[in-house]
Amino acid sequence: MRRIGREEVRMKKYVGIGVYDAVAEGNIAVYGKEEYVPEKVYRGDVPGEKARLEAAREAVREQLEKSRVRTLAEAGAEVARIFEVHKMLLDDGEFNGAIRLVIEREGVNAEYAVAVTAEGLADRFAALADECLKARAADIRDISRQLLACLQGSSCEKREMEVPGVICARDLTPGETASLDREKVLGIVTARGSLYSHMAILARARGIPAVVGVGEAFLEEAGEGTPVMVDGCTGEVYLYPDAETRTFLLRKMGEQQEEKRLLEALKGKADRTLDGRSIHICANIGGAEELEAVLLNDAAGIGLFRSEFLYLGRDTYPTEEEQFAAYRKVLEGMVGKRVIIRTLDIGGDKQADYFGLGKEENPAMGYRAIRICLTRPEIFKTQLRALYRASVYGRLGILFPMITGRAELEKALEICREVKEELSARGIPFSENVETGIMIETPAAAIISDRLAPLVDFFSVGTNDLTQFTLACDRQNPEVQPFADPRHEAVLRLIRMSAENARRHGIRIGICGELAADPELTETFLRMGIDELSVSPPLVLKLRAAVRSLDLARGKGER
Ligand code: PEP
Ligand code: MG
């Protein structure tokens, strides 16, 4: 009979949701399990409590800005937007007015006023049908926790760790996750949270092995210093792991490190199949601050620069100079490699108040992207001037989003010509070799790709929107995601059709939507004649490995 060791008796297994595929081992570092529920205290000092509230707001605002800047540098513009949204909520007039009203009417402490107002508001959002609005409930609770921590005189942003450890908490705000010292945090386990919570997004972006939603019972057991192993792939967490579990997970950890080492070795290697077919593996970015990640991962170019991020999280339009500086930086940084910059794709899920866009019933199919550019040419021309001026610093491709027909494309190209004429007349230099292309992200564009191809130099397939529009599944609505299979044959047929038309007209075609990173489809895309796959920077080398292992001459045959 097998002898049962002491540690086996003690080993406890918990299962949550793995949010980053990696294994971690260490000792628990408790981050804060207790939920602070402020008591209602009658203070009768309305001005004093209001002043405390203001001071706390100011402190939280500073913390959020710090987190935004840190995240921008580490994880890019898209992830850093979380903090812009939180800043907006912190300054929201209705939210603040309601807190002040509680202090005024009841003469109570600011802590209590914040907690009851935030809870009431969060409950209202949580009850809404719209998933985007529903998610606001978690944001409000995060802001409330930060305000309460500041009112308590402690910053909930920071937990100094003396030695490396695995963070254990009831939940973490995005600010707390962003401020964790990456050198010391071996992993994260939280009792609450979901796969798409901001904390999970940040942990993924920072490459921290993490499991969320393991349940409250875990908190009872996980004391400071308890040995723990975290499997971010399966969502399993082991307290006092036994020898067998340790051996198994350490082997898995070793394999993951080996894979990382192999990927490192692919830097500088060609994106070529075993039988010699080449493809460009490029990177998608949201701003110039992601350039470092692109270079680090040795991408062949930038396949999609989502320029709309320059317009988000601010109160006014970015000036021509600001845009010029960002485009120039990226073009110079890529030293001659192709950089495709997409013109403003605002509207839909990307909103900026100063555009003054009205509320729409169905924003994904609404007044957005090229539709705004063509009807507000002064905004479009400012961006185009910045782009053409920057074009002398590298190899630029300009990409128009949401195209559905020839007329709008012709109009966009005509505005490009006007901008070039105006620059020439003013003696301002620009490159004559700027390429123009369109997103194939509406079924209409794919269906008439034979008619659009003669007008442009390249196509770029946006599979995120192409899937949404082809399958009639709102990409913002998690409830319909089971019906939104991007590998659906209707989507693949539209891509194939566009690739055939691109080839017939001698233009290039790339894929820049999420599907580009799907290794199951790499062979299919190569066989379709796709010239470029553009993915988020950390996925470039994985895709290179997939391409280099393919042999199209001996392949399985077309899917
Ligand atoms: C797409 O739609 O696939 C795409 C790349 O654009 P975005 O995700 O920015 O809409
Ligand atoms: Mg799109």
Image (cartoon, rainbow, N blue to C red):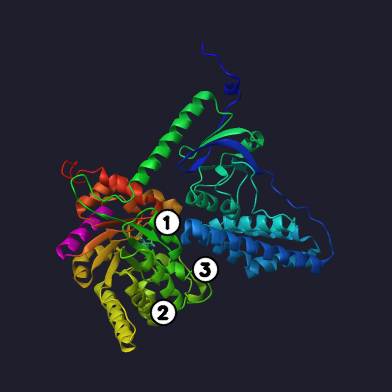
Q: Please state if 532 lies on the left or on the right of 191 as rendered.
A: left
Report which residue position mark 2 lands on: 379
- Taking 358 as reference, is 81 above or below it? above
Marked residue nearer the N-terminal end (2 or 1):
1
Which numbered circle lies on residue 293?
Answer: 1
Horizontal and vertical percent position of residue 491: 28, 55
The residue drawn where x is 59% and y is 55% is 175
Q: Secondary structure at mark 2?
A: helix
The residue drawn where x is 23% and y is 68% is 457
Which numbered circle lies on residue 13?
Answer: none
Q: Of tags 2 and 1, which is closer to the observer?
A: 1
Horizontal and vertical percent position of residue 424: 30, 86
Give the class, few, some or many, for how many residues have Cα within 10 Å of label 1's Cα (few <14, many ≥20): some
Q: Which residues are magenta?
A: 490-506
Report which residue position mark 3 lands on: 313
Label 1, label 3: how many angstroms apart (C-alpha)? 22 Å
